[in-house]
Image: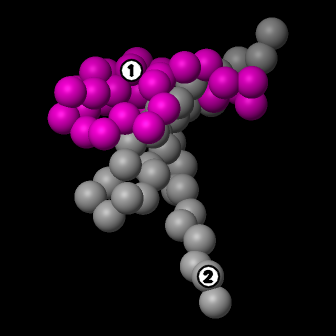
Amino acid sequence: MKLHKLSPILWTKDLQATIAFYESVKDKATIKTSIEDREYFMRDFSILDNNGYELVFGQHIKCD
């Protein structure tokens, strides 16, 4: 049986909190995906934890 790693999404308080958190960890953590607005209406980024799990941090953005 093969186990798959899941990527939890951790919602931040607001967009400024997402950006501030990214700035505080970008030089300390392994960044998997840089902060960016996604087509699924989120601004998010992801890091790898010490066990290789991807942790995604983000906030919903308005669609125009």
Mark positioned earlier in the residue sequence (1 or 2): 2
Does the magenta portion include 38? Answer: yes
Q: CA distance from mark 1 to mark 2?
A: 35 Å
Mark 1 vs mark 2, foreground winner is 2
Whether residue 54 is situated above or below residue 30 in the rendered picture: below
| Residue furthest to the left | 28
Q: Secondary structure at mark 1?
A: helix
Horizontal and vertical percent position of residue 13: 44, 34
Q: Which residues are magenta?
A: 13-42
The residue singled out by tag 1 in the image is 19
14 vs 51, left or right, is right
The quadrant in which residue 41 appears is top right
Name the amino acid type tagged 2.
Answer: Lys
- Marks 1/2 in contact by CB < 8 Å: the verdict is no
Which residue is located at x 31 percent, y 39 percent? 30
40 vs 9, left or right, is right
Identify the image quadrant of the N terminus.
bottom right
